Image: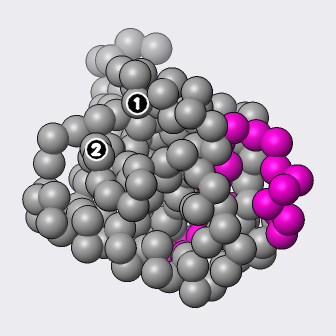
Amino acid sequence: MSTTTSPRMPRGMSRRSFTLMALAGAGMTAACGNGIGSRGPATIDARVDATLEEMYRSFPNTVTLAEKADGILVMPLVTEAGLGFGGAYGRGALRVGGGTVDYYSVTKASGGLQIGAQQYAHVLFFMTEDALFSFRSSAGWAAGADLEYVVNTNGQMLAADTNTTTSPVLAAVFGQAGLRVGATLEGTKYTRIIP
């Protein structure tokens, strides 16, 4: 089909593509302003403290997990949005021995047909020294399908007996709000940052 006989077709397709990309870009921009606010360490630490308090209050068994863990990564607020393709973004802190040792960002890109947005918090429990070392020494650690979830997005405790957990990295996903159903950490990438 030539552009002289049907000039609207390519132009319409271009506008549609542009519109989709602009909307997706707006979603990603909104995800970057995910409520963390200031990039300062004090703000991130305050949000991490509040997230841990909420998790311990809502899921008391996670207190035992935190005590047994060699380190915990707390992501107070992750915003995930999608329109055709999607992504997620958030900032948090790695705590070892009760104190913050590093700050991390979380990003995730996903394809396929998806529309909507959601926000959630999550905590990773590194149950062995090797798992913690592997995470900290990686330039960009990615969560795999082998994560064992101890709290799901419906707020249910999945692994009530902490002695039965076998994975070196455990995950708690909670506080979900938004229009999308479910939150999974598979494919999520964590990168050390200087806030």
Check the image and report above or below for 13 versus 41. above
The residue positioned 35% from the left and 67% from the top of the image is 48
* First along the sequence among labels 1 and 2: 2
Q: Secondary structure at mark 1?
A: helix
In this view, the residue in front, 117 or 126, is 126
- Residue 181 covered by magenta stretch: yes
- Whether residue 19 can be seen here: no
| Bounds of the magenta segment | 159-184
Viewer-proximal residue among 165 and 97: 97
**Residue 141 location (% of width, % of height):** 47, 28
| Residue that numbered label 1 is attached to | 136
Image coords of residue 165 (percent x, y): 82, 50
Judge the density around disc 1: few (<14), some (14-19), many (≥20) Cα neighbours within 10 Å.
some
Q: Secondary structure at mark 2?
A: strand
Q: Are marks 1 and 2 in contact (CB under 8 Å)?
A: yes
Expressed as whole percent of the image width and height from the top left, the position of residue 5 reads: 36, 21
Based on the picture, tell me whether residue 63 belongs to the magenta stretch.
Answer: no
* Between 115 and 28, the one nearer to me in the picture: 28
Q: Is residue 107 in view from this perspective? A: yes
Residue 102 numbered tag:
2
Q: Residues within 10 Å of mark 2 (few under 14, many from 20)?
A: some
Question: Could you say which quadrant of the image residue 55 lies in?
Answer: bottom right
